Amino acid sequence: MAERRTLQTEQISGHPGPVPGKGTQRDLEVCKLIDTTTCIGCKACEVACVEWNDMPFQPTMFDNTYQTMPETNWNYWNLIKFREHQREDGTLMWLMRKDQCMHCADPGCLDACPADGAIVKYANGIVDFQQENCIGCEFCVSGCPFNIPKFNPATKKVYKCTLCSDRVGQGLEPACIKACPTGCLHFGTKEDMKELAEKRARQLRDVSGFKDAGVYDPEGVGGTHVIYVLHDAEHPELYAGLPKNPSVSFAYKAWKSIFKPLGLIGATLGFVGVVFHYVFEGPKREQPEVPPRKPEAPAGRKGA
Amino acid sequence: MATSLRGLQEKEPAFFDKLGQTVVHEGELHRHSVYTRFLHWGYGICFFLALFTGFATYLPFLFRWFAPAFGGPANTRMLHPYFGLGFVFFFGLQAINWWGPMKWTDADSRWIRNLPQFLHSAESLEPEDVGMYNGGQKLQFWEIVIGSIVYLITGIIMWAGARTFGGMLVAISYILHDISALIMLFGIFFHLYQATFGQPGTIQAMTKGTVSEAWAWTHAPAWFRQMTGRDPRQALEQERQRRIARERAIEQLSRGVGPPGGGKS
């Protein structure tokens, strides 16, 4: 992190006492905290996302819930998923979860992507798609455990939430955070957000009577840079299919690190093999072979 | 004489007789019908289109320069499955066409055991029991049959994607699809080599449809016997004697005329 401290004040002329801020460390990793327990489903974050990213809105589909559409879309990266949940005592409650890219520390999309430079992960944890390098193979779609990347058939590229990397790069919070009226969305360093989330979960357990309240920061993908506070962390599937133990298939890593290079070398050996055969064994000709032309006997001169 | 003989067990739809023709010259044998050749080049072209689009998608860091020919990386990716389907379509018809002649026999097992000798070019003559296709050709045929099935199944899984089949199945399909492709590519190098530089005079079987009799008794003796009714080894020996006789005749002729250049000096 030394490179982050280049403009940090080291010495101050005529200043008594210690230099303020000297030696402070900044956590590079950013994190979005979504407190599902205080979400009211107003969809302000959805609107803010569409506005900031300047995405065209299209006719949507009503599926008998309050959801704007059934799934996130290539032009709709942020969607609150509504689920009506019946508790053990028979009463009903809304489970509202803001669905978007989780920005995994170990991203499955990046593992699966074959294109050079189509998916990057920044040091601050944001996983970003670079559409100019995307070849539209949709391998990322199969690599993602959260079903986030979406294909646009018109451009033949895949799109998803950028965690407003353009805003974050300028020191601003993502658009959805700015729009949230209840304060259920927070943005800061991973460490701070983790702490805040744990505090809120403790409050839910101790004060609000949600015994299973907890923080969703799944280990299977190395932790995420979008974390949830859930009423029931034991059953994340209740929140519109949030996977309990998301993981990236080992097949992707094996594919890229073992089968791709080995297979390529193996196939190349075929070419090397035939070249060697031609050089050292030569062709198999039809028999009887026409013998090579003998050097012209100096018969003419002898006769003369 | 040879014009009346066809390639063994190859059925040819009448339409293809009008599409192209096979002229069998003196000293040649009819090996592949127009239909067979049409299918061969059909899946041959599809194979290379699928190979180039596939490599541009599979290893862009090495092969991205293939993509512009197909309209950019995204188009390349979109076209690849169609080329693959084309390959499976044409090869599927060829597999039906060749199912009979490609049946595995004891001669083929012997051929595989003799592979080290085959690789030495010093002895060009194939064993006398090698028919229209040798063990290696049949092995490659059946490898491609199995490979095409793997291609088709895994390809469809990858095409429909994780939404339909789930991430795990798609991930395994990538691996199987690639392994299958690379095994086939490995084999194709040998195929191209044997057809051109490795055994000169072979490729005309797929262009003209004929091979020379000498090619037949050298590389497919049992097929030569079937086609002509002559013994391949005897035919070879006759040809050898004929050539020797011819050499002698020329020698005698030139001796009769006088030493070359003798008149000048």
Image: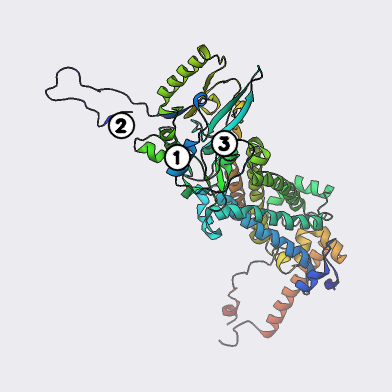
Q: Earlier in the sequence, mark 1 or mark 3?
A: 1
Give the number of the disc on residue B236: none
Q: Which chain letter goes with mark 1?
A: A
Residue indicated by mark 3: A144
Residue indicated by mark 1: A48
Q: Quadrant of residue A88?
A: top right
Instruction: Tell me which residue sits at (52%, 32%) in the image.
Output: A41
Q: Label 1: few (<14), some or many (≥20) within 10 Å? A: some
Residue indicated by mark 2: A3
Instruction: Find the distance from the CA under tag 1 to the CA under tag 3.
Output: 25 Å
Instruction: Find the distance from the CA under tag 1 to the CA under tag 2.
Output: 33 Å
Q: Amino acid at mark 3?
A: Cys
**Is B94 in front, or is B129?**
B94
Q: Label 2: few (<14), some or many (≥20) within 10 Å? A: few
Q: Quadrant of the C terminus of chain A?
A: bottom right
The mark tally for this picture is: 3
Q: Which chain letter goes with mark 3?
A: A
Instruction: Find the distance from the CA under tag 3 to the CA under tag 2.
Output: 32 Å
**Is A206 in front, or is A72?**
A206
Residue B40 position, x and y percent, is: 72, 61
* Residue B159, placed above or below residue B192: above
Residues under numbered marks 1 and 3 in contact, where contact means CB atoms less than 8 Å apart? no
